[in-house]
Structure formats: structure tokens, C-alpha cells
Image: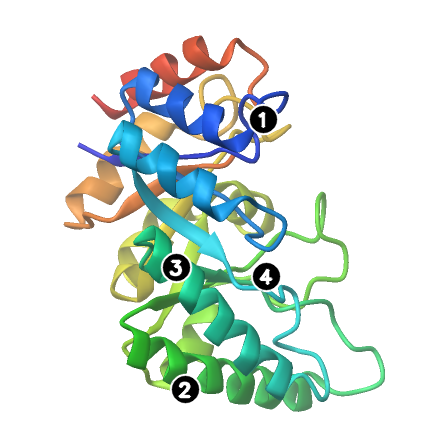
Amino acid sequence: MTTLSVCIEMFWRDLPFEQRIAKVAESGITAFEFWNWKNRDIPAIKAAMEETGLDIAALCLNPGHTLICRGARAELEQGMADTSTVAHELGCKTIIATVGNTIDDETYEISRRRVVGNLSAICHIAEDQGLTIVLEPLNTLVDHHGYWLQKMSQAVDLVKEVDSPAAKILMDLYHQQITEGNLVNNLRQYIDHIGHFHCAGVPGRHELLGGEQDYRALFAAIDDTGYTAYVGLEYRPLLDETVSLAQTLGLCQ
């Protein structure tokens, strides 16, 4: 059965983070994740984890959207070191990394070489810290206009070139449905390079039931690959959160 994690950035948005963690526990899901750690009360999050027994599936590298940026190597290395400290404090093993937007005055290949170099630099730190970096392609049609990394095949080429056990991919089934579809074939083909999944319904980025993806089939396909890490629920619920999560759990069974 698929092991779910709730992205608490998008659920119970009127509550403090520590209360959102308690809500996840009440839903019967055993893990949560969030994005930027810099503006969060890490001791309060840790206390909520200890009280509920929940695990943390992932958090984001700070700074984000900078792997493509010129002159960002030192900032990225320091950011990876700082993120590692927070990850260890919370017991988090997976760090989400985003690339940033296309730089118009240079070729794709020049940008690609910089991304590879910057990703390699932070992966060296991640290896030493026992962490995994998951690189995330995003869609440019709806949500992230101008974002440089869009397709799974491009992400696979990057992590293969970096050639680090710390370099993996975050396959977001929402973004990839919008970008290129072919979800089941791609996740099967690239599963050895995938370290985390996200999901949301298309269109709208809401519940998983009722959109153009068959999430019951997608969860079954993920399970069939032998993948045992987390699948993050990164959607904006239209239903009551408790009802929405119960509906999603039903798709996993």
C-alpha cells in the first residue's frame, strides 16, 4: 500500500504548523512535509512530531530556485549545510531542490552545465550528511512560467551526469501530467532515479478523485515497482481536509 505524506503547507492553512501536524496524525497518515524551513518554528515542529509520533518525509533546500543561477555556488553550499542541520534536527532524510527559471541570454547547454555543477556540489554535502536531494521538474503551462527543468527525461540526464547516490528526482504527478502525461510508463522507466513523489488532481491542483488522472491506477503502478518511500499529497483541498484525506486513503486500498 502506498505510504502517504501530507504537505501541511496546503492543508489547514488557518492553523499553526504544530496544530496541522496533529491534524495529520488524526487522519491516520503517518508523515508530513513542508517547504521553506527558514520562516518556521523548528523547535515547535519537533515537539509536535514527538507528541504525535509522525515522521517528516521531506523539506526544501533553502535557498530554492537557485541551481541555475550564476555565481550561486557558495550560497548553495552554505544553504545545503544549513538545511542539513535542520533536517537532522527533525530526522528528515529527503531534501527537495528546485532549479529556477530559464536564463534568456545563454544557451540551454551552458545552463545545463551550471545546474550539473551546482547539483554536484550540494550532493557532495548531502552524501556526507546521509541525505538525498530530490530534483523537481515543474510545469510551465499553468503554474511555473519560465521554469527551466520540465521533463522527467531531462531530470534523469542531470542526475546521471552528477552520478551521486544522493541525487534523485521528485516526480510530481500533477506537474508531469500537465507537461507530458505518460505517467505510468515514465514512473516505471525511471523508478530507480525517483526518490519522492508528489500528487494532486488535474486540473486545479485539488483532490485526486474526479480529475483526468486515475490515481487508483497510479498508486498501484507505484506499488508494483517496489517503491517504498513516501508519496506526498501536495494539493489544495476543496473538501473538508479530514474528508479529503479519507477519500485519498481510499484510493490507496
Residue at (46, 79) in percent of width and height: 158
Left/right of residue 175 with respect to residue 85 in the rendered view: right
Query: From mark 4 to mark 3, how far is it between C-alphas?
Result: 27 Å
> Of discs 1 and 3, which sits in the foreground?
3
Residue 137, located in which quarter of the rendered image? bottom right
Q: Is residue 30 above or below residue 59?
A: above
First-in-chain label (3 vs 2): 3
Q: Which residue is mark 4?
A: 150
Q: Which residue is mark 2?
A: 161
Q: Which residue is mark 1?
A: 236
Q: Which residue is mark 3?
A: 87
Residue 72: percent from left, percent from top: 67, 83
First-in-chain label (1 vs 4): 4
Label 1: which secondary element: loop
Label 4: which secondary element: loop
Residue 173: percent from left, percent from top: 46, 43
102, 61: nearer the viewer: 61
Q: What colour scheme does the image use?
A: rainbow
First-in-chain label (4 vs 3): 3
> Of discs 1 and 4, which sits in the foreground?
1
Marks 3 and 2 in Cβ contact (< 8 Å): no
Q: Is residue 88 above or below residue 204?
A: below
Label 2: which secondary element: helix
130, 215: nearer the viewer: 130
Amino acid type shown at disc 4? Gln
> Of discs 2 and 1, which sits in the foreground?
1
Amino acid type shown at disc 2? Glu
